[in-house]
Structure formats: C-alpha cells, structure tokens
Amino acid sequence: MPEPAVVENPDAPDTGVAPLVSVRGLEVAFRVREAGPARWRRSLLNAVAGVDLDIPRGETLGLVGESGCGKSTTGRAILQLQRPTAGSVRFDGTELTTLSRAELRRMRSRMQMVFQDPYASLNPRMTVGESIAEPMLVHGVGDWRSRRRTVAELLETVGLSPAWEERYPHEFSGGQRQRIGIARALVLEPEFIVADEPVSALDVSVQAQTINLLESLQERFGLTYLFIAHDLAVVRHLSTRVAVMYLGKIVEVGGDAVYERPRHPYTQALLSAVPIPDPHVETERRRKVLTGDVPSPVRPPSGCRFRTRCWKAEEVCAQEEPALRPMGDGQWAACHFAGPVGPPPTPALTLPRPAPPALS
C-alpha cells in the first residue's frame, strides 16, 4: 500500500521515528436497508472511506467535521471497537486488524477511550470506585488493596475527592462524570487515548476545566491523543495538528496554517461560521454559507464528495477525485483548486487561540 500524503510534513526534519499510531486506507461500511419503489433493499453505507493518518508519540491530532461525517466511527475503528471493513491500523508497529480477541484484549491496556456521553458510559449500578477499578480487575492488575489505592490516587489526579469512590454516577454533575471517565481511561496507564467529543455535552466553564485537565495529564503521563470534536477553537487549543473530515474522507490536515490560511473550501466554510470576539473584524468578515444538504454516504457524489456544495466546483470535480496535495508549511488539502499558500484571504478565516481559565 503506498504511503499517503496526508501525514507527511515536507518542512519537518526526518527523525526516523515511526508514529505511535499509523492508519492506512481505513474503511468502515455498514449494511443498511433502504425503502425502494416496491420493497426494502439492502445497501452499503460507507461511513469511513479510505482514511490515512499518522499520530506521533506524545502529540494530539484533532479530528473535526460535521455530524455524521465519520469522526467517531474512525476513532472506534482505530481501537477496534468497530472492526474495519478494510485498511490497516498499526499501533507501535503491531497490526491491530489481524489480532485475535485474546491478543487484542492484551493490547487494550495500552489504548483507551473517553466517550462522548459521560453518563451513558458509566454503569449506574456500580459505584465510581468499582467502575474505575473494573479495567484492572479484567486485566488481572494488582490485588484488592492496590486497586483501591490506585482508584484513590486517580480520583485525586482528576480533581475529585477519593472519599467519593463509594458514590454512584447519578450523584455527580456532568463535568464530574467526565472526569470519572478520564480516570477510568487512565487506570491501566495507556499510551494512546481516543477522546470522542469529551466536552461537547458540558457547559463552557466545565469545558475549560476538562481541556486543562487533558493537557496536564498529557504532560504528566506522556499521552498521545486523538481528539474528536466539533468546536474548532477547542481543537486548536489542545491539538498539535488538525484533520478536517467530510463524508468519510480527510479533506485537509495541518497545524496552525489550517486556521490561518485554509485551502479547502469546506474548511473555509467551517471557519467562517465561527464567531470572532472582535466587533470590527466581525462586521467586516464575509461568511461562506454552504448550500444544499450533505449527500448520503450510501450514494456519495462522484469525484470530489464536496462538489455538490462547493462554490468552486467545475466539471473536473465530478470526474476525478482530488488527492491530498502539499500546500507548504506542513499543510495538505484535497482540492483541485487549492492553490499555493498565500496571505489569509479574509480576516474572517483567522481564528484566535483561546486561553481557558486555569484548572481549580
């Protein structure tokens, strides 16, 4: 399988170090039933259609896009919670897609997930201490005393009182339940964590505390994150690089250049919808409004999947699918009309980096 362009940075020195997570040609398809003229018929829904990603050790890759574009499915497929239809997922050099269930269970101690809904991911019949200690019990780590000690230390690490371990999930707020989910993900000392929209269900002040907590834990334990979210400002604050996803495909990837000089029309439209806390810039900026609906992943458009909503679309977009091409400054975009990097096209497409309050 050829090396994809999505993850390479031509401006960065070659360290010769393999990434911790390497994804090639990842595809996830589901069999669905559609209502036809006479009867129900079975169709194939391609939720993820050929994703290539590399995540170096100790870095955070942000994954953004509209609801239903395949972000969460990508994260679950990387961890093999959802088995991929095709493609390769290598974790620290080990191919995960070919592992048996027993081998995969042993690998799971090094890979964990923080789920989007902090309440649904916790068993309401188990105390907080039991939920956090359960992974250690499954993997046979330590005895009863050491597990209790580890649970108390982790609760304190995520900013909760160790005395609360006998409480049940319904006794906590949404932000506190998300901290419990983070503690459970850390209990086996993993190297890689998929955070599936961990702050989307929280209010703004609690979001800032959770983001600061994730940052401090990364520095303390050397964690590697795949951070899935809708909020572009949150992703920029936490992520080393960001990948923009549309209808199952990566359309743009890079660092700060994605925010300052977006090359793909879809990224430009996403950034133009983000309000900027500057009245002078806000009144002068030009909003790029997308027309039409998101196409069905059952029957995606030919060529470029974004062409049905793109103001730059021409005949070549329907005939040929654009490949990710280097734009310079470590930025890549999949668009036939993404030219070389220049100055920012409008002030509207420059997103300030947020500074959330310190974690109390």
Image: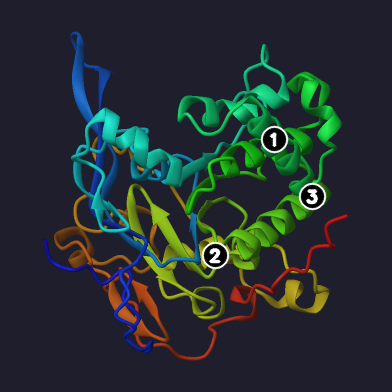
Which residue is pictured at 25% across the width and 34% down the height? 29
Circle 1 sits in a helix, a strand or a loop, which is it? helix
Under mark 2, the amino acid is Lys
Residue 289 position, x and y percent, is: 54, 59
Q: Are marks 3 and 2 in contact (CB under 8 Å)?
A: no
Which residue, given by chain and number where applicable, does mark 2 sit on?
Answer: 288
Q: Does residue 350 sit above or below 153 in this rendering?
A: below
Closer to the N terminus: mark 1 or mark 3? 1
Residue 184 position, x and y percent, is: 61, 36
Residue 203 position, x and y percent, is: 79, 43
Which residue, given by chain and number where applicable, does mark 3 sit on?
Answer: 204
Which residue is pictured at 83% across the width and 57% down the height? 359
Closer to the N terminus: mark 3 or mark 2? 3
Which residue, given by chain and number where applicable, does mark 1 sit on?
Answer: 151
Q: Does residue 279 sit above or below 21 in this rendering?
A: below
Left or right of 235? Residue 208 is: right
Q: Does residue 166 sit above or below 89 in this rendering?
A: above
Circle 2 sits in a helix, a strand or a loop, which is it? loop
For the residues labelled 3 and 2, the Cα–Cα distance comes to 26 Å
Which residue is pictured at 72% across the width and 25% down the height? 128
Instruction: Report which quarter residue 9 is drawn in.
Output: bottom left
Please say whether residue 276 is visible from this viewpoint: yes
Under mark 1, the amino acid is Val
Which residue is pictured at 20% across the width and 57% down the height? 303
| Quarter of the figure with the N terminus | bottom left
